[in-house]
Image (tube, coloured by chain):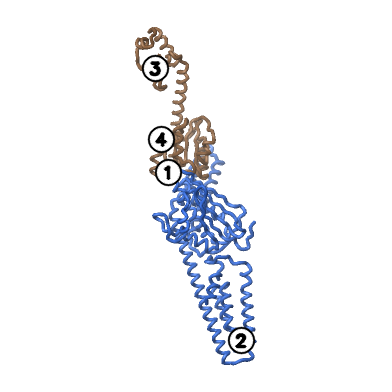
Amino acid sequence: MNAPKQNSLVVVIDDDPSIRRALDSLLRSVGLDVRTFVSVEEFERNTLPDMPTCLVLDIRMPGMSGLDFQRKLAGADRPFPIIFITGHGDIPMTVQAMKAGAIEFLAKPFRDQDLLEAIQAGLETDRTRRAELADLHELRARLSSLTPREREVMSHVATGRLNKQIAADLDVSEITIKVCRGQVMRKMQAVSFADLVRMADRLGVTLTDDH
Amino acid sequence: MRGAQNLMASSRPWIERIGGRSEARTLSSARVLPFVTALLAGLIFVADTFTSLEIAVAVFYVVVVLLSAIFARPRGVIVFSFGCVVLTVASYFLTPGGDIQAGLINTFISIVAIGSTTFLVLRNQSAQLAADDARTQLAHISRVTTLGELAASIAHEVNQPLGAIVTNGNATVRWLSIDPPNLHEAIKTLGYIVEDADRASQIIARLRRLTRRAPAMAVPVDVNDAIREITSLMQHEFRRHRIVLQLSLSDALPRARGDRVQVQQVVLNLLLNAVEAVTAVGDRSRELTIATALEDAKHVCVSVTDTGPGIEASVAERMFDAFYTTKPDGMGIGLAVTRSIVEAHGGRIQVKPNSPQGTTIQFTIPVARGVLPQ
């Protein structure tokens, strides 16, 4: 648990001041950056720095409940991993929370080690998600650098069609397709044909024309 | 004896206890009445002594006994009545003229009148006392039952600071195990532990005060403070039902005259009633407001407002009746006890519909004697 700080943030949302400051002290003592909020509403009024983030929140709070918030976050552009804390073992709620993708569900009083491990897992999840997201952004940028014709060729190539077939479909020479395909490979920075297919898959590039 | 009962009904002898009286006794009557009573006894003695033996002025000593019942406890009443008998006998011997036989009969009649009046006054007093005790006990039983229903909430309320203590303890260990140890943070976190432990023990203390069985005593009560204590015990109940509680407590509220725990019980019952009302509505905003204000300079007014579905007029009329309930598992005791407490304090309780929705229940408690509104 030492020196886990890799530019990450833990957000604590709890309406009880005692719990808030205790969690704040505990998390800071292991070197985590912490921000605490009284309510979901207060959290939403603030903008967070763009870094791997994990949420620790009480499942029952006045105003918007933890579960409602989880549902709302899932639909948002930053689906933070959530660790729920509850004062009492509420089984239906636990099931609901875990189904909705909560990292962990801790009943008070919990072992600090359990919480810290859950937080590490949560931060790791968010880090992975962010890395994937960054990759996707990069790929999208590459895709947008293609000309319409190259894009068309890429969608055909990705479905496994031969140059000859594509040339016939698009009514151009096979040489043109070959050149075009080389351009696509270069612009997309694909190291192999398989790599390009995988990229097309992630980007959702499919045959969009009349075929 | 009708007169004696009326006197008893309108004016209670043991002022410190909360009883069925509807008016707080005024400052003047509390101090002046014993003197007036003694003076009256003196006047009757003089009149009895200087009129002839045939005239039974001594019968008027019954008024002295009745007056003494207003301000004295049973023992004091006995002292007054014994004094009256002594004065009657003394007058018989001191009276200068008249028919001795008639005088003897008149003295005998007077003593019987004084004695029987005393007997009835004492019996009435002890009946009142028993009624007060019964009311106190019923209030106690009802209070403990209510707190029993709140047990899960109260346990959670204690659990919060305890959970914080555990976390703070762990944090302190970690602050101290860093190399070099961060003493500043460790000390700060230890301070949190002390505060949280204090918070937990305060909750227990509040709970103990509420469950204690003691005769209801009228003392000056800081109603705002009493309300805050109750709402702090109910925090989890509000969280559980996702209710937003608004406290709108008047800053310039004089202290009320009453029994602190019973006033809290009234607030607790009304709040629980309101919680039930707002949870009956689906997703509409669940809001409760508890407000205090000074009413007509003589009463502290507490109102509990909910955004529930409201109460039908037919229910509102009967909701404070004993054994009247709209709940399948209710006993119909809580609100009946609530009303009896408020009325025993010399206050009033009423239900008002709210617009656009919801209900306000408000009650009044007289301002404490000698406390002026600020």
Give me the C-alpha separation between circle 4 and circle 3. Answer: 37 Å
Quadrant in which residue B348 is drawn:
bottom right
- Is label 1 on the same chain as label 3? yes
The residue that label 1 is drawn on is: A107
Mark 2 residue type: Ser
Give me the C-alpha separation between circle 4 and circle 2. Answer: 98 Å
User: For the residue labelled by badge 3, is the local secondary structure a helix, a strand or a loop?
Assistant: loop
Mark 3 residue type: Asp
Q: Position of residue A120 (x, y in %)?
A: 45, 34
Q: Position of residue B109 (x, y in %)?
A: 54, 85
Discs 4/2, front: 2
The residue that label 2 is drawn on is: B91
What tint does the image give chain A? brown
User: For the residue labelled by badge 4, is the local secondary structure a helix, a strand or a loop?
Assistant: loop
Asked if labels 1 and 4 touch by Cβ distance under 8 angstroms, the answer is no
Q: Position of residue B36 (x, y in %)?
A: 63, 75
Chain ID of residue with mark 2: B
Q: How would you rate the neighbour count of disc 2 (Cα within 10 Å): few for under 14, some for 14-19, many for 20 or more? A: many
User: Residue at position x 52%, y 57% from top?
Assistant: B350
User: For the residue labelled by badge 1, is the local secondary structure a helix, a strand or a loop?
Assistant: strand
Chain ID of residue with mark 3: A
> Which of disc 3 and disc 1 is earlier in sequence?
1
Mark 4 residue type: Gly
Give me the C-alpha separation between circle 1 and circle 3. Answer: 54 Å
- Is label 4 on the same chain as label 1? yes
Residue A209's disc is: 3
Chain that the image shows in blue: B
